[in-house]
Image (cartoon, grey):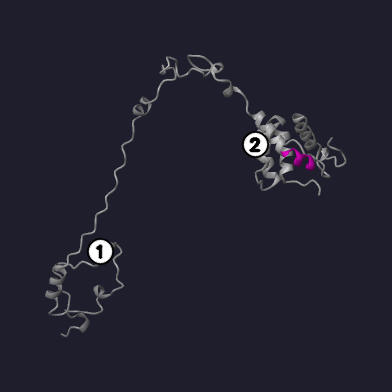
Amino acid sequence: MTTAPENRGGFRPTAPQNNPANVSATGGNGQSGQAVPGYTGFAYGQNGALEAQAGAAKMEQAPSPTAASAPAPASMASILGGLMPLDAESQDDRPISDGVDVGRGRGSEALPPALNSDTRITENIDLMKKYLPDLLDAARLPGAPDSYKRLVNYVKARLI
Amino acid sequence: MKWVENNFFDHLDKFGNSLGYDNFGIAVCLSMVPWQSPQDRDVFIMTLTGEDVKGGEPSTFNPGSAVM
């Protein structure tokens, strides 16, 4: 019985391990790049030399992935423990609810006037002064609606 | 030139009349927004006020009237 040449032992150039395009799907976990100890598939007389060469240049083992440990969930008690009750005493012997219309202490009447005043009026006057000439010009355009003219008249009356 | 829709003055007309004259400053700021269309602006106003848009209706157009 005669064995076909492709089935005989020894180095076979068409073997899968000799195909450079044969890339391991598992990446670094595959066999590529690292000589398998005891592998004797090379050509006759080269096994010992190649094994010695591979052993002399050990490849660094691929680092094993490690999952980052998730931070421990903070308990609700630890979160709420840092909050100060609304009626707690502050440093000036007044509750921190002082100035608010809820809880102990004075109400919003205790706040300085600047925090109570509506600043929209001042802002409106400034904007009216700035835009009035252009607003008047636009109000004279043919087709300007009466609602717009009433608005411009209001702005003009506020500034006079 | 004539009055056209979807510009600053048209927006100011709608916002000023819909939000009220006292909110003139807010109306000016909102009128500077580059609204994609008058419909987008009107939807915003209706969402904000919960009412129909005021100002600029065709029935109120009076091209011949004077401002002062």
**Callout 2 environment at 10 Å: few (<14), some (14 to 19), or many (20+)?**
few
Q: Main secondary structure of the magenta part?
A: helix
Asked whether the viewer can see residue B51, the reply is: no
Q: Secondary structure at mark 1?
A: loop
Residue A139 at x, y percent in the picture: 80, 40
Work out how far the residue at label 2 is from the one at label 1, CA to CA, in angstroms.
Answer: 62 Å
Q: Is residue A137 left or right of residue A43?
A: right
- Chain for numbered disc 1: A
Nearer the observer, A147 or A159:
A159
For the magenta stretch, what is the residue range? A131-138
Point out the residue furthest to the bottom here.
A2
- Residue A141 disc label: none
Where B55 sits versus A33, above or below? above
> For the residue marked with disc 1, what is the amino acid?
Gly
Q: Which residue is mark 1?
A: A30
- Chain for numbered disc 2: B
* Image quadrant occupied by the N terminus of chain A: bottom left
Point out the residue furthest to the right here.
B64
As for residue A132 lying within the magenta part, the answer is yes
Q: Which residue is mark 2?
A: B47
Q: Is residue A28 left or right of residue A120?
A: left
Residue A10 at x, y percent in the picture: 17, 79
Q: Is residue A42 left or right of residue A67?
A: left
Asked whether the viewer can see residue A81, the reply is: yes
The residue under the point 40% across, 18% down is A91
> For the residue marked with disc 2, what is the amino acid?
Thr
Nearer the observer, A96 or A71:
A96
Residue A13 at x, y percent in the picture: 24, 80
* Image quadrant occupied by the C terminus of chain A: top right
Image quadrant of residue A80?
Answer: top left
As for residue A145 lying within the magenta part, the answer is no
Residue B22 at x, y percent in the picture: 70, 29
